[in-house]
Image: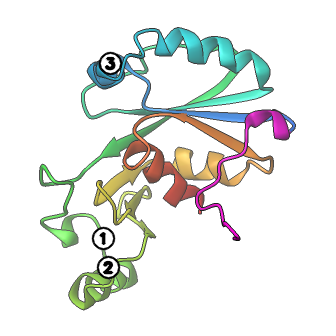
Amino acid sequence: MSKSIINYIPLFEQYDNETLIIVDVQKPFAKWWEKAGHDTLPTDINNYCRNFHQVYQIWDDHDESQPSWKFNNECATLRKHYGVDQPDGEIQDYSAYFDGDELKKVMDIVKSGIEEPALFKRKDGNYAVLVCGSHKWFLATKELVDSLLLINDDIILVGGAEGECLKDIEVLLG
């Protein structure tokens, strides 16, 4: 009998330990990891950071004005924002965020009902990311997008919920 492995995630030891990205490990989200029995998550991740040459911290500004921690080997802190106009993360007024060709592309996708992840440039020069998962949209700064585009190494993601916060960044990296 043949078995295939779906969503196999190799251990970091199989890489050159160059780049770690920490996503949404911040005090407002502590209730989620504490509920799962990971009371020492920030400390554990900080120790894990010693294995990497570059550590990027992506933090959500939804309930905070700055990251909660500074991690070992951290080379950048990059801001994002979950959701948009609605509590479910949906955009209510697309023309408030996009114009011209970008607005047309967004509206074509919305009208067609096609659910594929996509990146759209906003009026302000930043980006809106259509995730198509538990999180519908999130807002990414130009700095976040530009910084991630410069990474040429294998990337290990740690932190936020797998189907939510981590998926946001997986879509952005994809």
Q: Is residue 17 left or right of residue 80?
A: right
Q: Which is more toward the observer, 124 or 130?
A: 130
Name the amino acid, label 3: Ala
Q: Mark 2 or 1, which is nearer the eye?
A: 2
Name the amino acid, label 1: Phe
Point out the tag, 1 or 3, that comes first from the N-terminus.
3
Point out the tag, 2 or 1, that comes first from the N-terminus.
1
Q: Which is more toward the observer, 44 or 120?
A: 44
Boundaries of the magenta span: 1-15
Contact between labelled residues 1 and 2, with CB atoms less than 8 Å apart:
yes
Which residue lies under the disc numbered 3?
30
Q: Residue at x 32, y 18 (%)?
A: 30
Which residue lies under the disc numbered 2?
106
Q: Quadrant of residue 114?
A: bottom left
Query: Residue 50 at what x, y percent from top left?
Result: 75, 15
Query: Residue 134 at what x, y percent from top left?
Result: 29, 55
